[in-house]
Amino acid sequence: MKKYADLHVHTNHSDSTLSPQEVVDIAYRKGFTAVAITDHDCIDGIVPAIEFAKKFGIEIVPGVELSAEEGNDEVHILGYFFDYRSEWFTGRLAEIRLKRVDRIYEMAEKLKAYGVVIDPKKVLELSGRGSVGRLHLAQVIFNEGYTSSLVEAFHKYIGNDGPCYVKKYKLTTKECIDMILKAGGVPVLAHPHVLGKDELVPDLIKKGLRGIEVYHTDHVNNITLHYEEMALENGLLATGGSDCHGKGKGKILLGKVKMPYEIVERLKVEADKIKRSMEGAVRRAE
Ligand code: AMP
Ligand code: ZN
Ligand code: FE
Ligand code: FE
């Protein structure tokens, strides 16, 4: 029987409504063999998912999604098979998450001027100990009756062009890629079509990018073909995933992108290569 993987799934450790256990449960019911947990700036969903997945015989791919800034664009970089027990890696992520908390306070302050009074603590309660974001803030704005939907909260206030939007603290693309490589992981450009800046790709490759997310729920057929070619021409791994956020973005997307399991094996081989070259670099420096 053919085996399938989804390499881009969020949990409630960032801005999905689903717990790691619920993700595993849905993945099992949809017939997946492997699922990558790729929360924004947070890897705390990985171990609970691994524990729970044992019962189902599902493999959890350790993942993360980092946000980088490149001019006015926000570039999302996925990382796979890094050492998720690395203390400096988890420490660095914790620092990045603290900046997200500051940002919620700043946006709440801006919202006040528009008559929208939000207690930032309610937003933080909603996100729990994970990574807080605008999806949580939109939920509280909606819950408090200021808008009739989450989308309206983005349109009126906190969308990228909204009056109460505050930019996220972001690393550079080099910092993101370096961070993943240093932890022995494979850096992959997330949803390139959403970014819409193909001209950035050669530079990202020079910085150490190893793959691009060819298959994604926001990529329609001819776009997929375009990125398949780009991957082939540049020797990049062609990855794919649903980018499921539970009900955070309407429908549950897990199941919409089914990657052949072989891509998981290719990522493992690449991660092993990266780990060996990183160890070599450390030895040379000693
Ligand atoms: P953050 O990482 O905190 O900037 O939050 C980004 C999240 O907000 C992503 O999950 C986006 O999909 C969501 N988002 C951004 N703009 C909109 C919008 N106009 N409508 C709905 N969701 C949005
Ligand atoms: Zn998200
Ligand atoms: Fe993303
Ligand atoms: Fe994502």
Image: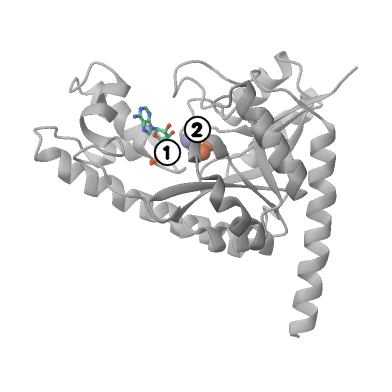
Asked whether disc 2 touches disc 1, contact meaning CB atoms under 8 Å apart, the reply is: yes
* Residue 125 to residue 67: above or below: above
Query: Going 45% across and 43% down the picture, which residue do you hit?
Result: 129
Query: Which residue corresponds to mark 1?
Result: 128
User: How is the structure coloured here?
Assistant: one colour
In which quadrant of the rendered view does residue 144 lie? Answer: top left
Q: CA distance from mark 2 to mark 1?
A: 8 Å
Looking at the image, is 248 positioned above or below residue 41?
A: above
Q: Is residue 43 visible?
A: no
Occupied quadrant, residue 122: top left
Q: x%, y% of residue 1? A: 91, 17
Residue 187: % across, % down: 66, 52
Q: Earlier in the sequence, mark 2 or mark 1?
A: 2
Q: Is mark 1 within 8 Å of ligand 2?
A: no
Q: As drawn, is 89 to the left or to the right of 210?
A: left
Per the image, the residue denoted by label 2 is 12
The answer to whether one can see residue 10 in this image is yes
